[in-house]
Image (spheres, rainbow, N blue to C red):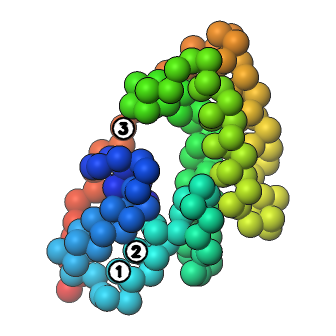
Amino acid sequence: MHDVGAAKFDKEKHHITGAELATGILLRCGCSAVHIGAVARAIYSHRGSQNIPFPSVAAMCVAAADAKDHFDYVGELWRVADIDWGIIELQRHQYLLDKLKRDWAKIHPRIREMLDGSYAMARQTLLQIANGVIIPVERPMPKPLACTRSP
């Protein structure tokens, strides 16, 4: 749910709109206020470019998972930077390289140890895409999850 605000609105304030949207979704699903608050705070703090302190270990994990997703799907980031964000090709490599650096910086050092070179591989893949060695492809979208209430 951390990027639900970007999907519905735009990326610039998606940490804010995402927390708001997630709150509404979780309220409709019958989640407790404690859990909704924890999720909303994790979503709000997940962006490396905003330098918002992580309020919990769970929030730190959401930010690390967000970064890991970027590392694993650099080709998709390339396509999004072109199609959705309108970043011209001459600037796209540097823009995404800076984004990956911010992602790496927001990950706690103990979590970095578990990422098995993902950041270095992402940087290499990005360079290969920029040089035309690799053609980025879109990953298949997962099926949406249904909201279920617990008894």
Name above or below for residue 75 compared with residue 59. Answer: above
Q: How many marks?
A: 3
Whole-Å distance between the Cαs marked 2 and 1? Answer: 6 Å
> Would you say the residues marked 2 and 1 are in contact, meaning their CB atoms lie under 8 Å apart?
yes
Q: Amino acid under label 2?
A: Ala
Residue at image mark 2: 40
How far apart marks 3 and 2 lie (CA) works out to: 23 Å
Q: Say whether disc 1 or disc 3 marks the residue closer to the N-terminus.
A: 1
**Res. 138 image quadrant:** top left
Q: Describe residue 115's horizontal placement relative to residue 74 as left or right.
A: right
Along the line of sight, which residue is nearer the eye, 69 or 126?
126
73 to 62, vertically: above or below: above
Which comes before the other along the chain, label 3 or label 2? 2
Is the C terminus in the top left, top right, bottom left or bottom right quadrant?
A: bottom left
Question: Are dots 3 and 2 in contact, CB under 8 Å?
Answer: no
Q: Circle 3 is placed at which residue position?
A: 141
Position of 117 relative to 93 (above/below): below
The residue under label 1 is 36
**Three-letter amino acid code of the residue under disc 1:** Ile
User: Mark 2, residues whose alpha carbon is within 10 Å: few (<14), some, or many (≥20)?
Assistant: many
Kind of residue at badge 3: Met
Q: Residue 109 appears at what percent x and percent y?
A: 80, 65
Identified at 62% across, 75% down, the residue is: 53
Foreground residue among 98 and 28 = 98
